[in-house]
Image (cartoon, helix red, strand yellow):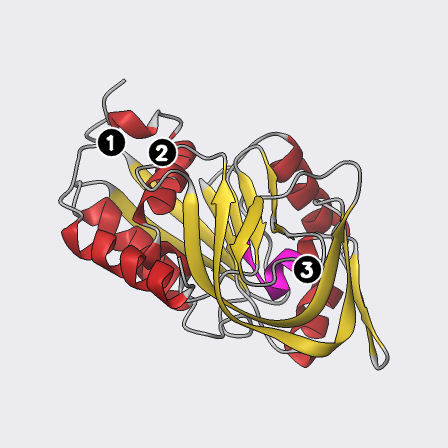
């Protein structure tokens, strides 16, 4: 099914002024450019503390990462109707990208000696703080279809150790780096079109095909139906990220 000439993608961005570290705003800029180059309308709906999420007016949900203090502020707002909406969003197969702290908050919670943050429970995942930070370039192998054989590359920097429950499947297998906990060899979580991951960098400019997969999922079409774009610069960025990860 070809792209409707009137197609428009609206991204609801949760707490954009609080959850925006490690250049992850670049994910949104990249999504916007990929849409604009295809003449697909694009808009961002910022959702702050106290703001409702307009599910009917949203095609894709994006949640970035933040410091513990900022995550605690956001988590205290993610109660009641908001939390229920996000659980329904993920379980119904609608697309979401949650990075680092956002990934943690969409799980059951984050615990450290000085911090206890209750999560939404949209993902069956639990995070506790480790003694050391897991830092460095990372590459993971996924089963997502893409021109790089499903390999995602990026950068991770987190102290959290995330354990997936029986109701969750990992986004991918670690080829190089630490992943969810530095032990299991798994990274992130994926439920239908919703993804949680520790990959920064930002993630999407280094993995252009994942951006297209999210766009297509949000528009309700196959990624093959998106108008093709020249991806020489994007492929070079991906190769550079892979090289940094030793792949």
Residue under circle 3? 104
Looking at the rendered image, the quarter that the C terminus falls into is bottom left
- Left or right: 182 as drawn, with respect to 149: right
Q: Earlier in the sequence, mark 1 or mark 3?
A: 3
| Tag 2 secondary structure | helix
- Range of residues picked out in magenta: 98-103
At 72% across and 43% down in the image, what residue appears? 84
- Asked if the magenta segment contains residue 117, the reply would be no
The number of numbered badges drawn on the structure is 3
Which of 5/222 is in front?
Answer: 222
If you read the primary sequence from the N terminus, does the residue marked by circle 3 or circle 2 appear first? 3
Q: In this view, does 8 lie to the left or right of 230?
A: right
Residue 55 makes an appearance in the image: no
Q: Identify the image quadrant of the N terminus.
A: top left
Image coordinates for residue 7, horizontal then vertical, percent:
27, 34
Circle 1 Cα neighbour tier, 10 Å, few/some/many (<14 / 14–19 / ≥20): some
The residue that label 2 is drawn on is 216
Task: Return the residue at label 1.
Answer: 226
Q: Contact, CB < 8 Å: mark 3 with mark 2?
A: no
Place residue 161 in its image quadrant: bottom right
Instruction: Tell me where residue 212 sits by quadrant.
Output: top left
Dot 3: within a 10 Å radius of its alpha carbon, few (fewer than 14), some, or many (20 or more) residues? many
Marks 2/1 in contact by CB < 8 Å: the verdict is: yes
Secondary-structure class at tag 1: loop
Mark number displayed over residue 127: none
Query: Is residue 180 in view?
Result: yes
What is the C-alpha distance between the residues marked 2 and 1? Answer: 7 Å
For marks 1 and 3, give the CA distance. Answer: 31 Å
Mark 2 crowd level (few <14, some 14–19, many ≥20, 10 Å Cα): some
What is the x, y in percent for residue 29? 31, 61
Q: Position of residue 230 (x, y in %)?
A: 13, 45
């Amino acid at each position: 099914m070809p792209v409707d000439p009137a197609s428009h993608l609206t991204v609801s961005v949760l707490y954009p002024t609080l959850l925006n570290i490690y250049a992850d705003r670049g994910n949104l800029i990249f999504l916007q450019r990929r849409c604009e180059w295809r003449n697909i309308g694009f808009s961002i709906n910022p959702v702050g503390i106290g703001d409702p999420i307009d599910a009917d007016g949203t095609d894709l949900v994006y949640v970035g990462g933040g410091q513990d203090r900022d995550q605690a502020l956001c988590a205290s707002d993610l109660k009641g109707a908001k939390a229920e909406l996000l659980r329904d969003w993920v379980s119904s197969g609608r697309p979401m990208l949650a990075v680092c702290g956002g990934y943690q908050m969409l799980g059951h919670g984050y615990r450290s000696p000085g911090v206890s943050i209750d999560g939404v429970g949209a993902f069956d995942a639990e995070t506790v703080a480790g003694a050391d930070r897991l830092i460095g370039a990372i590459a993971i192998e996924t089963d997502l279809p893409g021109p790089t054989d499903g390999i995602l590359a990026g950068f991770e920097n987190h102290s959290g150790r995330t354990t997936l429950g029986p109701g969750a499947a990992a986004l991918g297998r670690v080829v190089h780096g630490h992943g969810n906990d530095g032990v299991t060899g798994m990274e992130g979580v994926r439920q239908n079109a919703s993804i949680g991951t520790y990959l920064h960098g930002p993630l999407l400019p280094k993995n252009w095909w994942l951006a297209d997969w999210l766009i297509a999922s949000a528009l309700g079409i196959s990624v093959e139906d998106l108008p093709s774009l020249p991806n020489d610069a994007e492929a070079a960025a991906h190769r550079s990220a892979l090289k940094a990860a030793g792949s």
